[in-house]
Image (cartoon, grey):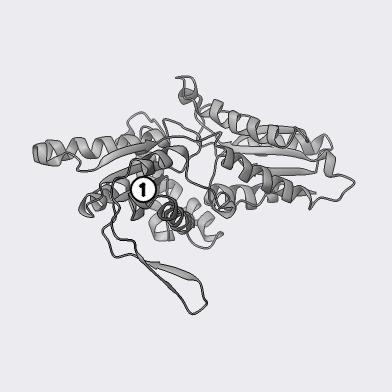
Amino acid sequence: MFHLVARRVTCMGLGIRPVPAVQKLAARGLSTAAQPEKHEDSDGDVQVHDERKPKTGIMMMNLGGPETLEDVQSFLLRLFSDKDLIPLPAQSFLAPRIAKRRTPKIQEQYSRIGGGSPIKMWTTKQGEGMIKILDEISPQTAPHKFYIGFRYADPLTEDTIEQMEKDGIEHAVAFTQYPQYSCSTTGSSLNAVYRYYNKRIRDRGEEGRSQMKWTVIDRWPTHPMLVECFAKNIEKELTKFPADVRDDVVILFSAHSLPMSVVNRGDPYPQEVGATVQRVMERLGMSHPYRLVWQSKVGPLPWLGPQTDEVIQGLAANGKKNLLLVPIAFTSDHIETLHELDIDVEWRM
């Protein structure tokens, strides 16, 4: 029996409170302006109607994904043009050609998961839950508004920052949706923020400087509630195995791989992913054998391993066929979970 752990909106489903950096930002708030009006809808649920200008804006940073098949090529072009993510020789020359060549294959993959990435939809749901909690626990910094800042799909990071400036946000939080830091993911998003303001200042002089006070949440790999999210979902999924094999299940923690060229320059991502796995297994009391494996290798150059599919095949060849696959570096579903794990891995098994 091969089993895949449930992933959808993992953290928000357990009512996670904001990570410490958000709580500290909230504690610094000064305003005690009038509170928003509350009323009950037709179902009796309390709804909050707040027409005040948002004071605190939280930009939820992530890679993003094409919402339609027509968006795939532009998404790939931005992705392969990013030197922080995929450093290539003659990048400006190669990136458009690689994107064009890979577009039909990637379009076919997205067509198999509904015709587009759901990452914006899930990020929106997470953002709505987050600001509801923040408005309740921190009226001093309210109203809060979430924004989505993707690197390779709309809404792009740069466009989101421009909107936050137009909205008159006072406190801006750059909140990575990658729990573990890498220069190729969170680092790329933060570099985009830096380059945006650099260009604004060059174009507008002093008027181009940000009117917002920025706070950065760049990693949260061992946050207690992140660990609890994964542990509870693992415990829930383990109960679905027959009792006579449950203790023999091998837990495979799968994370997006990195080129070894990035790893060898000291990127902390592998260690931070390992730290998440360690905390989760400690929370589970080291109840099962486990492995940390890596997925999504692209191209012929060396990448961090072992690869997820190769480990699964190796375990199966050795008689280990009761596996629980946990995407440990993802906070919402997208192509790497819905296609690469749900479809590709299942097909291989």
The picture places residue 87, in percent across and down from the top left corner, at: 39, 30
Q: In the rendered picture of this protein, how many numbered marks are placed on residues?
A: 1
The picture places residue 85, in percent across and down from the top left corner, at: 41, 34
Residue that sits furthest to the right in the current view: 244
Q: Looking at the picture, does residue 260 appear above or below residue 26?
A: above
Secondary element at tag 1 = strand
From the viewer's side, name the closer residue of 53 and 201: 53
- Residue located beneath label 1 in the image: 58
Q: Looking at the picture, does residue 43 appear above or below residue 334?
A: below
The picture places residue 333, in percent across and down from the top left corner, at: 54, 52
Residue that sits furthest to the bottom in the current view: 42
The residue at 50%/71% (across/down) is 45
Mark 1 surroundings within 10 Å by alpha-carbon count, few (fewer than 14), some (14 through 19), many (20 or more): many
Q: Could you tell me if residue 211 is visible in this image?
A: yes
The picture places residue 313, in percent across and down from the top left corner, at: 73, 38
The residue at 38%/49% (across/down) is 75
The quadrant where residue 128 appears = bottom left
Q: Amino acid at mark 1?
A: Ile
Q: Is residue 209 left or right of residue 271?
A: left
Q: Is residue 249 left or right of residue 200?
A: right
Q: Could you tell me if residue 94 is visible in this image?
A: no
The residue at 33%/40% (across/down) is 28
Q: Looking at the picture, does residue 117 appear above or below residue 95?
A: below
From the viewer's side, name the closer residue of 269 and 140: 140
From the viewer's side, name the closer residue of 37 and 265: 37
